[in-house]
Amino acid sequence: MAKTLSDLIPTHGDRAGLATTLKNALDYDQLTNCMRCGFCLPACPTFRETGFEAESPRGRIALMKAVADGLMDPDEAFETQMNHCLGCRACEPACPADVKYGQLLEQARDSVEKHTTTHRWWVKAARKTAFEGMFPHQNRMRLLGGALQMYQRTGLRKLVRGAGLMKLFPQHMRDMEAILPDASYKGVVEQIGAFHPAKGERIATVGLFRGCIMDVLFTATNKNTVELLNEAGFDVVIPETQNCCGALHAHSGEQDGAKALAKRNIAAFKAAGVDWIASNAGGCGALLVEYDHLLHDDPQWKDDARWFAKRSVDVGKLLVEHGRLRTVARAAVAAGAGAMIGGSGATPASAQVSGGHGAPSGGCGGSCSGGVGFASDEKVRITYQDSCHLRNVMRSSEAPRKLMRSVANAEFVELAEADRCCGSAGIYNLTQPQMAGRILDHKMEHVKRTGAHYLLTSNPGCLLQMKNGIEKHGMGGRMEALHLVDFLHDRICAKD
Amino acid sequence: MLQEAVAGKLRAIVGAQWFKDDPESLITHSYDGTPMLQSLPDGVVYPEHTAHVSAILKVLQEHRVPVVSRGSGTNLCGGTVPVQGGVVMVMHRMNRILQVDLENLTATVQPGLNTKAFITHVESLGLFYPPDPSSMAISTIGGNIAECSGGLRGLKYGTTKDYVIGLEAVLASGEIIRTGGKLMKDVAGYDLTKLLVGSEGTLAVITEATLKLVPPPKTKKTMLAMYKDLYGAARTVSKIIENRIIPATLEFLDNPTIRVVDDFAKLGLPLDMDAILLIEQDGEAEMVDRDIERIAEICRSENAERVSIAADEAEALKLLTARRSAFTALARLRPTTILEDATVPRSKIADMVLAINEIAKRHGVTICTFGHAGDGNLHPTATTDARDADEIHRVEEAFAEIFEAAIALGGTITGEHGVGLVKAPFLEWKVGAAGIAVMQGIKQAFDPNNILNPGKMFAKSARKRVVLSRG
């Protein structure tokens, strides 16, 4: 019997325990399904940045399999490598064998978290606070939003910045602090209520998944989502007992936490009796459509989880495929250049979208204040950065483009490598600032070349990262990053 | 483990961060695109230029350490699995296009250059580099040269060997040789350029290549023909060539493949067809139209059940879907996919496909066949499970018989994947004992101490695929 690598590495700490946990957790069928053809390599951002096989999906799966096969001990480098992956899952559409890389990654990270000895005490404390104390509780998230709002609106931020206190934080944290949008103490339900009827004939009832971060940092986007959905013919309900989707938990190796959150969401939306569950954050939506996988071994919940997953959809796709929405500015309607998109249930009466909103014109409902200052019907150039999870997991890349192409007075230009991760990747830009920075720099070179006025995205993490990139590369004032929903709302609903 | 003296010298040459011997690096360089093969190296080194390669080889030669040079590790013959350990030399850092010479229509590139990136660059200059292995999105020019990669355009445009006209390579001794050049004619001595193309890293490490470029075709047209009779399809292939038409692409799917593809892509393909031919012609518009018309006539005269000609690019894409989905559909069928490349004279395609189907049936295994009918290069593909030892054994027996059948029909054991580890036991069947002796003599002349990719090309006798692990 030949010697294996594990003979060469001293086993210490909880490595043996971790090896056992990994062996049990990793789906060996999936590990076997990887035939090592290498087609995933060009799709992988970390492989492209480093050129190292270990930094590729094929390499990471080989490492997992080596651990499962007892060929290698899960050492610190193994842990580091698992955390180095962005989890963008661009490798999945590229895979001929349909290997569920995202699931393998989560199984690996979950195992690592159970045994990790590398977190310092304060990382542990922060994780515990965030994953157990904050995200699962929307009211606490709002309190946090309130605190952030106070920090931003009172003189406190000025004081902190003036006193140079931000210098205590590393550069990438300072960059993020600088571009955080104004937080809101009141979420979308507190501001506008939980039920909003469709305009014209009702096509279906949509439950809005408001998202925990979305509802604190991008409350206006949630409000705009509701109005867009109403405009397109959907009743919208916002079940109040819903909570965080659990994506940050799942991607950070906290499977149990993710499962508990999923169950509460399933119960909330089942009780609301919705036809669709719409999300406006690709990162959340990608987990919502995989609740069936998350709870597949829970006999009590698996059927309801399947019900939930089947109904979950990104707001863009819902608008394009089932809604009736005239995504044109009024000027273009007058000129007879109106374009109808989707339209599966369009009726002449409901095709009238302009009028009756009473929203202030010449702005975008406050959500894009302080931007590049275009009126709602002025000719602009727009471009789009895909949300990886929207594209690679929810497999929706055409719908947002269809929407953007149909907006009057907006010239859509494709961003080179829009399908590549921007480096945001959940909290990756905070945990792996170096790699995230390299990826962002390459991204912004392409962004610069589009000459766009608006850089649109479909996920809060990407949006913050793009805002960060625009600032970092000195393009503020010429270009603004916006959520696709806010741009559409500005061009369609916020007209008198 | 490498002697510390060797590791230290390699670090001194390339810098500490470009030599790795941690478990993570060793595991991730223990395999390539070939199923069921794994063997750990003792170190991984990333040279930046030819002088690095030369210095590295001098050290490894001195200490008699095996070395496997590789690009992206996508080959299907076990060509870059370090079966005798030693050092894996990854060429990714040497990835520059050194020159595109528009007067001579040549490009000079480094081996680690990504094939697709190269093709894209060349096309942006209005030129054409035809070799298009399906791995080109990730494979490298160096890897393509080492394996003499083919692709879909082989019939009309040839394969990698037809485009490599000059090389710089480092011998096992560390000496640097240059062969050929920007020359369309060159008979100065033995043709070392052609010898190194397809030598699978066993003779030298390629560090630079001069490639021939051609003007791109102006237009392209795509068509599809379906047959209930395999021989009708096969006769169509021969007849097209007989009629002095060389299509750019002439691809083939057999019935088991059609079933799998239809089930996967829901294309509504008629499942009672024994064969589908996908045909493309490129060139001047007038000639393309004339050829496609003539080919359609031939298809009909050979009793094709259905002939469809794409009116535009969107329709062409639809017709291409069946062929393009073949690999993906097969890969998803079972956990393990073994893709071989037995090749026969194109007039023998029908006989070969029937032989494959009969052999598969007899051994109770699933083998679907698709491939490049125009050059007789078939891809019998077994879908199986590496964990089922008994089935794997039957698959191996079946493939041995398939290679035998190919040779009996005047064919070869491998058309474009290479010999490597997987087909080494069968090489003698094709080239004979004397052929092996000549090849071994060549190997001896280039690499007297057998440090360059040892264990490949020449086997003792075993023909069983094994999962290897060594320390």
Image: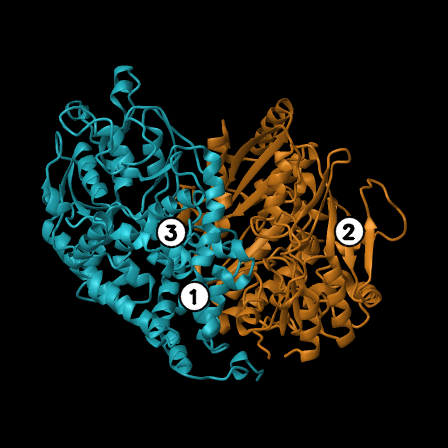
Q: Look at the numbered discs 2 and 3 and tell me whether their residues touch, using CB distance below 8 Å.
A: no
Where is residue B94, by image quadrant? bottom right
Q: Which residue is mark 1?
A: A82
Above or below, comparing residue B371 to residue B470 in the picture: above
Under tag 3, what secondary structure?
Answer: helix
Q: The disc labelled 2 sits on which kind of residue?
A: Leu
In percent of the image, x 82 and y 53: which residue is there? B178
Residue B149 or residue A469, whichever sits in front? A469
Decide: is A170 above or below A208: below
Residue found 38% across the figure and 47% down from its top: A468
Q: Nearer the viewer, mark 1 or mark 3?
A: 3
Question: Where A87 falls versus A367 (above or below)?
Answer: below
Which of disc 3 and disc 1 is earlier in sequence? 1
Q: Which mark is residue B167?
A: 2
User: Distance of mark 1 from mark 3, alpha carbons?
Assistant: 26 Å
To which chain does the residue with label 3 belong?
A: A
The one nearer the camera, B396 or A308, is A308
Horizontal side, residue A210 vs residue A255: left or right: left
From the top left corner, tell me how far across and down residue B214 is, in percent: 71, 35
The residue under label 3 is A175
| Residue B455 seen | no
Which chain is represented by orange in the image? Answer: B
Chain letter of disc 2 in the image: B
- Answer with left or right where residue A477 lies relative to residue B447: left
